[in-house]
């Protein structure tokens, strides 16, 4: 995260980091993921480009992100069937689900450090209500080029015309973009933040998983804002894969 305002890991019980099983405790996770139920985590499809989509190649670290993590091996990785990778050109349908091991609805016992994020409702996706109160969280690099701390920053949604200004048609209706100026610096996600949550507050002030960090040209350049998979466009897909709201 570039332009961060501090660490707030206590406030992100839905956050889980994804590691290769060969290096479960390196300095940087491969990706961040977000718990959406006791049995499912949502992340970006492009997280699996390097180590493949065999679930036994990965470990998820959950809970308190200060040395009291719990680790689980995912049971299954489901990558969106329309996902297209185009390195450097943005990613379409950049969404994947991780099934955690255990019986339906009972994979993880939630506690004060572990719980699920709310999914958006379809009406939240209309531009008549573009939430301004949004936060990005991740272990990615900072302006000085390094970080192993979990950082967080305000990053309001930008209007579509701003996202299209430089990205053109690479920015599709299945994407969102964010950014804002904070203390003279343009807030953005950066290398290592991929897969992580863009959480926005709805009108009832509930935090809702609105985006998944996906791509962007460079970091902290107001001309090229960070791009996120638009979760509200994938509700049917999520319900189809997970078995529906009964399980979520
Ligand atoms: C990454 O590699 C990454 N500024 C995430 C976000 C952005 C660039 C790279 C967008 O994790």
Image (tube, rainbow, N blue to C red):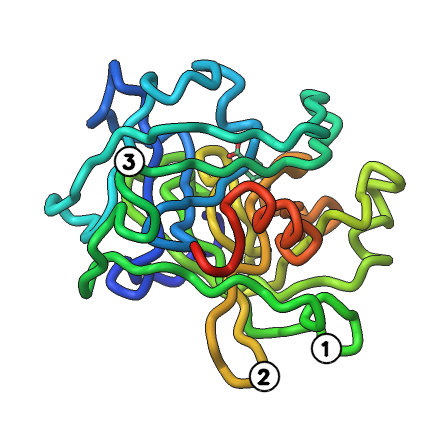
- Report x, y in % for residue 227: 66, 46
Reading the image, the residue beneath label 3 is: 101
Residue labelled 2 has its Cβ within 8 Å of some atom of ligand 1? no
SS state under label 2: loop
237 left or right of 174?
left
Within the displayed image, which quadrant is ligand 1 positioned in? top right
Report the mark closest to the observer, 2 or 3.
Answer: 3
Residue that mark 1 sits on = 129
Query: Residue 236 shows which numbered tag?
Result: none
Query: Where residue 109 appears, x then y in whole percent?
Result: 20, 55
x 41%, y 40%: residue = 32
Residue 7 seen from this side: no
Which residue was labeled with disc 2? Answer: 203
Q: Are marks 2 and 1 in contact (CB under 8 Å)?
A: yes
Residue at the image point whose x is 42% and y is 16% from the top: 54
Distance between the alpha carbons at the discs numbered 2 and 3:
34 Å
Q: For the residue carrying disc 1, how many other residues have a C-alpha within 10 Å: few (<14), some (14-19), or many (20+)? A: few
Instruction: Give left or right: position of 23 versus 97.
Output: left
């Amino acid at each position: 995260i570039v332009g961060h305002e501090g660490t707030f890991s206590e406030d992100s019980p839905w956050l889980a980091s994804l590691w290769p099983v060969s290096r479960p405790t390196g300095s940087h996770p491969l990706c961040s993921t977000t718990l959406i139920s006791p049995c499912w985590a949502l992340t970006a499809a492009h997280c699996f480009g390097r180590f493949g989509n065999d679930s036994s190649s990965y470990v998820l670290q959950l809970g308190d992100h200060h040395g009291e993590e719990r680790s689980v091996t995912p049971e299954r990785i489901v990558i969106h069937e329309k996902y297209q990778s185009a390195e450097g050109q943005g990613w379409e349908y950049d969404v994947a689900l991780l099934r955690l091991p255990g019986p339906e609805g009972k994979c993880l016992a939630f506690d004060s450090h572990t719980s699920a994020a709310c999914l958006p409702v379809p009406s939240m996706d209309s531009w008549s209500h573009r939430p301004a109160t949004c936060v990005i969280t991740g272990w990615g690099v900072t302006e000085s080029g390094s970080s192993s701390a979990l950082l967080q920053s305000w990053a309001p949604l930008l209007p579509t015309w701003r996202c299209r200004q430089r990205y053109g048609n690479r920015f599709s209706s299945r994407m969102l973009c964010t950014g804002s100026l904070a203390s003279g610096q343009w807030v953005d996600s950066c290398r290592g933040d991929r897969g992580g949550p863009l959480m926005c507050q709805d009108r009832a002030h509930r935090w809702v998983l609105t985006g998944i960090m996906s791509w962007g040209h460079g970091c902290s350049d107001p001309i090229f804002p960070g791009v996120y998979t638009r979760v509200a466009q994938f509700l049917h897909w999520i319900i189809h894969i997970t078995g529906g709201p009964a399980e979520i």
